[in-house]
Image: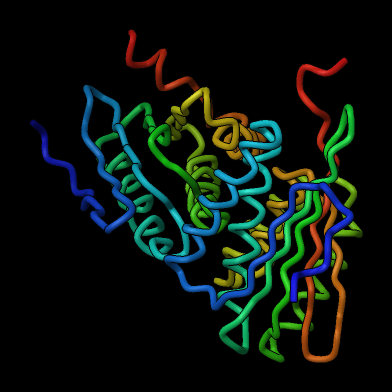
Amino acid sequence: MAYIAVTPVVEPNFRAEAILAGTSLLARFTGTADFTVETHVDKFVRQVHAEACRLEATAVDVDISALEFVNSSCLRAFVIWITTVQDMGRRRYTITFLFKPAAGWQQRALDSLEMIGEDVVTTRSAESSRGS
Amino acid sequence: MSPPASSSKNPRFELTFAPTVILVSVVRNFIHDFYQRVIGKEATERIAMATHELLENALRYSAEDGATLKVEVEQHPTVDHVTIRIRNRPSESHVGPLKEALAKMNENPDPDLHYLMVMRESWRRKDTSGLGLARLRAEGGMRLSLELDGEYVCIVAQCDLEKQGVS
């Protein structure tokens, strides 16, 4: 397995990890992304972006389907990431957020991110991804 | 002495406690479990989200270890009226920015664009104040107002949620 320089986050109620899948990166979040892990989320997202650039990834999948909640400060980390990718011009990659269809709050949160990053962000059901 | 009988049958919840980072999520989950038994799924999720953001806000900027949370849902045939109140004594330095954040919010008719603006500004300022409130408006569809009572402030978040499956 190819090495990627993204340090997993392991906290009592939150985890984040990233793996390489072909030419894409997959970042997966679990638990509750709240006040207690804001700095971890910020650092993790920066590392994912740095690796995506280093590996010249064409796409990054972000699986939030196992998150129970994301607070606005953690969402801000995603917003900053999206705007950074938008500023990359031709070198930009796509960011696809995978969500759980039954969790309406995830879709509402992602609607905001899609609005911000309409040229970079897409969303997809995590369940359809697993079936493919 | 027995407590006064309430004339309201609205499902409501009131809690005074010292919020800590762990308890904020505990209360959010409790609110979610409480309301999912009486109102629709979407309304429940919005209330839970708003509760969490307001409690984190109180946690970050409170001058004392105490906050009072009140949630009430007025149920009508086709719509639920939700009111969430969080009362606490904020640090002095936070009252001005709070008033300013709400004033800016009310000046911006588009909740989504305002949310985006707040996100970007907070990154430049390295400061997360105002983010949660902007999210309540954009994702929660909530109207926000501020009530001042001496050293105490009460943030009021309200919204009307149409019941799903009701024509």
> Looking at the image, which is closer to me, A112 or B12?
B12
Give the answer, above or below, for where A41 lies relative to A100: below
Location of residue B144 in the rendering, given as x and y in whole percent from the top left corner: 83, 59
Residue at the front extreme? B1
Give the answer, above or below, for where B52 lies relative to A70: below
Q: Residue at x 29, y 49 (%)?
A: A15
Indicate the quadrant where residue B167 lies.
top right
Location of residue A61 in the rendering, given as x and y in whole percent from the top left corner: 38, 30
Which part of the image, by quadrant, shows the N terminus of chain B?
bottom right
- Residue B62 is at least partly visible in this image: yes
Report the side of B24 relative to A93 (left or right).
right
Q: Residue at x 76, y 23 (%)?
A: B164
> Looking at the image, which is closer to me, B142 or A114?
B142
Give the answer, above or below, for where A41 lies relative to A126: below
Give the answer, above or below, for where B151 lies relative to B123: below
Residue at the left extreme? A1
Location of residue A3 in the rendering, given as x and y in whole percent from the top left corner: 12, 40
Report the side of B158 relative to A77 (left or right).
right
